Image: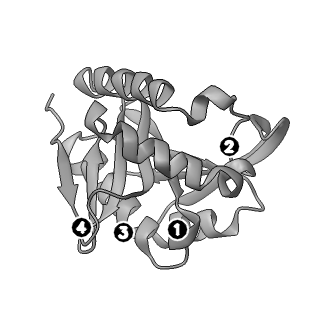
Amino acid sequence: MTSLQPFYETERLWLILSHTGLTAAVTAYFCRNREFLRATEPLHTEEFFTAPYQEEEMKRAVVEAQKLGGARFWLAKKETPRVIIGMAALNNIIWGPFRSCFLSYRLDEREVNRGYMTEAVEKCVEIAFKELKLHRLEANIMPHNKPSLRVIEKLGFHYEGLARRYLHINGQWEDHIHMVKLNE
């Protein structure tokens, strides 16, 4: 197996692998987007929006990346590299004959509909398939989250079904559309 690079580059973005030096910027991102993200996230405690909590999350993400069990990339525009505008992640990487993971992503409210997430997810697909040699990426998206579905569809993910009451989001169990891309 390989190891992940500390950062990756796209035309307009840096994808920065989690490290504790990002704690302040990530905390600011979550605080700034608290209300915007509520509809698509699990309920968070007040502690979630603090630097100590986010630093512990960063430490866990660093260990996961070192073990190649997951990779959380924080997004920053090249012209403002110290401001986090989102995250794209390869979660729960399973090796062996499965060679698969779950894709997740979130974006700053101020940056939606500018193509940043498509750019970032496209790079994550490249990392997953070319670098890590994974076979399958899965994304689960609530049916009403049309912008998120558009990102995945543009990148060639295909519908595999509806997962009923799949994740506990904002205090209730939500259905999710199961989308998949195979490394052909």
Q: Secondary structure at mark 2?
A: loop
Residue 16 versus residue 172 in the image, above or below? below
Answer yes or no: is residue 177 visible. Answer: no
**Quarter of the C terminus within the rendering:** bottom left
Q: What colour scheme was applied to this rendering of the protein?
A: one colour
- Mark 3 residue type: Glu
Q: Secondary structure at mark 3?
A: helix
Q: Residues within 10 Å of mark 1 (few under 14, many from 20)?
A: many
Q: Among all residues in the image, which is located at the extreme right?
A: 172
The tag on residue 89 is none
Q: Residues within 10 Å of mark 4 (few under 14, many from 20)?
A: some
Q: Of callouts 1 and 2, which one flags the residue occurring earlier in the amino acid sequence?
A: 2
Contact flag, marks 1 and 4 (Cβ < 8 Å):
no
Q: Residues within 10 Å of mark 2 (few under 14, many from 20)?
A: some
**Quarter of the N terminus within the rendering:** top left
Q: Of callouts 2 and 3, which one flags the residue occurring earlier in the amino acid sequence?
A: 2
- Mark 2 residue type: Glu
- In the image, 152 versus 18, the foreground residue is 18
- Residue tagged by mark 3? 119
- Residue tagged by mark 1? 151
- In the image, 69 versus 57, the foreground residue is 57
Residue 103 rendering spot, x and y as whole percentages: 48, 45
Residue 12 versus residue 148 in the image, above or below? below
Contact flag, marks 3 and 1 (Cβ < 8 Å):
no
**What is the spatial separation of the Cα atoms under label 3 and label 4, in whole angstroms?**
7 Å
